[in-house]
Image (tube, rainbow, N blue to C red):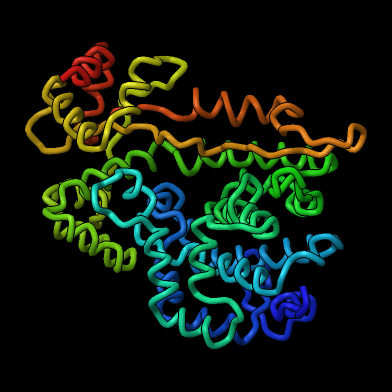
């Protein structure tokens, strides 16, 4: 690194800060301020970080704007830590550091309202948030600001965000943005927990974990020193509980199933694409006024919210056949199965009175991370060193937290729960 990074100078000697929760002062330079003040970035103030989670935890109203500032701040702290290593300091370039800092600030720039639930539907032709981010970074006023004030190019930042990295330093920097202990997860676990009003995501020692981060020279990825092993275990547990109790709370999953059904019944793909340019509030109104599932949208987004209730659930441990058959369905197949199940359950003619919620297939609590052992002078997988990580991240989560559920309108709950044949009816519906 031949030239000092202005943002690191601001971290050490802040002249201007933005205060975010919890008592966090984010140091801002003039060129960072110019990016934050663009319409494209300011749009994040109108996008909730947790979306439908606020139906269960009403104080979870924080935005992707706040989260992006938190991730940017952590990026500076990670760099400050690693620049203490002579090898890293000698090999990394100022341009590589600039790209990383910009990628941290702009990593969520392509998001839209209810982005992840809609992307989970895998609708044909839908442009993902990563592709939208590339377009925004390279074709809006953000590109002009980068060209004017930074040594790197907008294209450099966009490519980095896709994982297109070459040098060992770039690979290490990318793992700081996308890995089991990256700056994104480090921020959202604590921030989501704080705003939701629950302790689960804050019960690990972030500073201890950060201070134990090292580079694995064999993989050019983030790794841990042995002194941070317990902190890493606590972070795994924090993610596990946050998914179990917050992100995938059964009422959140019900609201998600309702939203996805409403989106699937939009008249055209252009209607769905329109959502990408709206704020959260605008998207709620647009979906409610446009979808053919009007009654369902009114229940979800209307002045009196009526969220469907759970009448059946299973996981891979309690019913492997149902779990894997439902998890393997496309969204259109899942929707058709829900309609067949409603007929078999004789739940009336009200459209979408019965909805099936399928578990996401991605591994959300992966913890593929190496730990350095000073005695053997070697690296080994964290899951080999820690039975806690192996059980929580690999076994307990996939086999117990992820669940298939049947949700029904509230007036149907008592009758459905009294039935003893829901499992059999679901299997019949799955068989077509």
Out of 235 and 96, give the one closest to the viewer.
Answer: 96
Residue 155, horizontal then vertical, whole percent = 48, 71
- The answer to whether 335 is drawn above or below residue 116 in the figure is above
What is the residue that sits farthest to the left in this orientation? 349
Which quadrant does the N terminus fall into?
bottom right
Quadrant of the snapshot with the C terminus: top left
Judge left or right: residue 372 versus residue 27.
Answer: right
| Above or below 251: residue 22 | below
Task: State the image coordinates of residue 271 (x, y, percent, origin top left).
Answer: 18, 60
Q: Position of residue 341 (x, y in %)?
A: 18, 24
Identified at 53% across, 76% down, the residue is: 153
| 194 displayed left or right of 267 | right
Q: On the picture, is 351 further left or further right than 22?
A: left
* Count of labels in the image: 0
Quarter of the image where one finds residue 392: top right
Single out the residue that lies furthest toward the right: 375
Q: Do we see residue 137 in this rendering?
A: yes
**Residue nearest the viewer, comparing 48 with 208:** 208
Residue 187 visible somewhere in the drawing: no
Q: Quadrant of residue 252?
A: top left
Residue appearing at x 69%, y 48% in the figure: 221
Q: Quadrant of residue 105?
A: bottom right
Residue 149 in the image: state x and y as whole percent: 58, 86
Q: Residue at x 45, y 30 (%)?
A: 402
Q: Residue at x 25, y 37 (%)?
A: 331
Furthest toward the front, the residue is 166
């Amino acid at each position: 690194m031949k030239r000092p990074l202005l943002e690191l100078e601001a971290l050490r000697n802040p002249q201007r800060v933005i205060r975010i929760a919890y008592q966090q002062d984010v140091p801002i330079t003039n060129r960072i301020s110019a990016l934050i003040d663009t319409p494209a970035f300011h749009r994040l103030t109108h996008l909730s970080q947790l979306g439908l989670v606020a139906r269960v935890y009403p104080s979870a109203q924080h935005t992707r704007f706040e989260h992006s500032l938190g991730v940017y701040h952590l990026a500076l702290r990670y760099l400050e830590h690693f620049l203490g290593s002579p090898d890293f300091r000698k090999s990394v370039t100022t341009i590589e550091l600039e790209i990383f800092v910009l990628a941290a600030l702009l990593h969520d720039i392509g998001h839209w309202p209810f982005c992840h639930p809609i992307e989970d539907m895998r609708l044909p032709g839908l442009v993902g948030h990563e592709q939208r981010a590339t377009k925004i970074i390279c074709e809006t006023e953000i590109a002009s600001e980068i060209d004017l004030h930074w040594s790197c190019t907008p294209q450099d930042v966009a490519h980095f965000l896709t994982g297109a990295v070459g040098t060992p330093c770039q690979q290490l920097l990318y793992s700081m943005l996308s890995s089991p202990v990256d700056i994104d997860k480090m921020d959202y676990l604590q921030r989501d927990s704080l705003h939701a009003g629950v302790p689960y995501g804050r019960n690990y020692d972030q500073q201890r974990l950060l201070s134990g981060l090292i580079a694995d020279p064999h993989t050019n990825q983030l790794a841990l020193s042995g002194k941070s092993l317990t902190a890493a275990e606590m972070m795994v547990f924090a993610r596990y509980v946050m998914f179990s109790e917050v992100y995938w709370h059964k009422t959140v999953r019900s609201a998600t199933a309702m939203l996805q059904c409403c989106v699937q019944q939009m008249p055209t793909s252009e209607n769905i694409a329109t959502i990408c340019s709206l704020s959260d509030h605008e998207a709620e109104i647009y979906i409610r006024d446009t979808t053919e599932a009007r009654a369902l949208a009114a229940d979800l987004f209307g002045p009196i919210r009526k969220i469907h209730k759970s009448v059946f659930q299973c996981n891979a441990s309690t019913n492997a056949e149902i779990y894997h058959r439902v998890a393997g369905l496309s969204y259109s197949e899942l929707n058709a199965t829900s309609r067949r199940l409603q007929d078999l359950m004789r739940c009336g003619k009200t459209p979408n009175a019965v909805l099936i919620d399928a578990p996401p297939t991605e591994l959300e609590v992966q913890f593929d991370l190496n730990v350095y052992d000073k005695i053997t002078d070697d690296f080994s997988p964290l899951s080999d060193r820690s039975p806690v990580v192996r059980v929580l991240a690999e076994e307990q989560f996939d086999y117990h937290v992820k669940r298939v559920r049947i949700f029904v309108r509230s007036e149907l709950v008592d009758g459905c729960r009294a039935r003893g044949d829901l499992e059999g009816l679901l299997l019949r519906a799955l068989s077509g």
